[in-house]
Amino acid sequence: MAIPENFRPKILGFLCNWCSYAGADLCGTSRYQYPPSLRIIRMMCSGRMDLDFVLRALSNGNDGVFIGGCWLGECHYVTEGNYDALSVLHLAKKLLAKVGINPARIRLEWVSASQGNRFAEVVTEFTNELTTLGPLGEGEGIDPATLKLKLDAVARLLPYIKLVEREKIRVRFENKEEYAEFFDSPALNALFDTTIADKLAISQILGLLHERQRSTREIADTLNMPISEVTERLKDSSRQKLVRFDEAEKCYALA
Ligand code: FES
């Protein structure tokens, strides 16, 4: 993929009021330089971060999402929301990867109120990384219509995904590394595959069939999904009477 020469990534940043937002403020008043790529939404705590915010940010034309919070152990609330932000980060990365979007497009950093220079550094680094990845969708080889379809497919499943997260995935570890290890573990991957990934595939397929009927091959090619997976998911969907096979056209359509 050739990245457009004048491409400047757009990042939506969610910053906690007490640390990262104050760090951004100090960065400005100290005149540390960083690229004009970031638009900021101030939250009281990074624990307010929600999967829905990530999807809406990407659906609305941003190329990346930045979450800024207090260092672990320094959250200003007894609930220590920055631990929850780590879970949201990792789950969002898994969901994005599953629909073919580069998980590096979401990033979380701890920045204290006194770290204006660090704020400039991490935003510059993230901007450079996104510049290398290219525009959202284009960088992944996904056309705009399919990108929208994929993000909508995740958004439709969010209430269910949040339920699974609350019931089966919610964890509390001591540090960033332990979160990364847990979310990358075979046990978590198996749980993700059996509870979320199959439904995510079906959600994408149904979204595509909502436009018009298609063959298995066409669905696989459009969604960049292995044909074996599409076949399996279509069988599941037929059993649930969500789709039907049109013998004459040799295509699947919504039931
Ligand atoms: Fe900053 Fe909770 S107040 S992360």
Image (cartoon, rainbow, N blue to C red):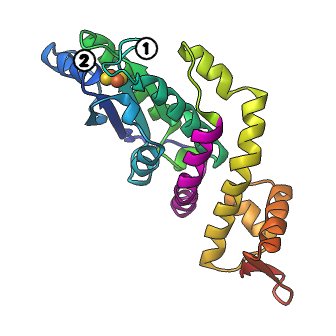
191 on left or right of 137: right
Q: Dot 2 surroundings within 10 Å: few (below 14), some, or many (20 or more)?
A: many
Type of amino acid under label 1: Leu
- Residue 244, above or below 170: below
Expressed as whole percent of the image width and height from the top left, the position of residue 189 reads: 74, 35
Tag 2's secondary structure? helix
Picture quarter with the C terminus: bottom right
Name the main secondary structure of what is drawn in magenta: helix
What span is in magenta?
A: 141-168
Q: Nearer the viewer, residue 7 or 207?
A: 207
Q: Is residue 39 above or below residue 25?
A: below
At label 2, the amino acid type is Gly
Q: Separation of disc 2 and disc 1 at Cα? A: 16 Å
Q: Which residue is mark 1?
A: 72
Query: Which residue carries the number 2 mark?
Result: 23
Above or below 68: residue 248: below
Closer to the camera in the image, 60 or 129: 60
Of residues 125 and 22, which is closer to you in this image?
Answer: 22
**First of labels 2, 1 by sequence position:** 2
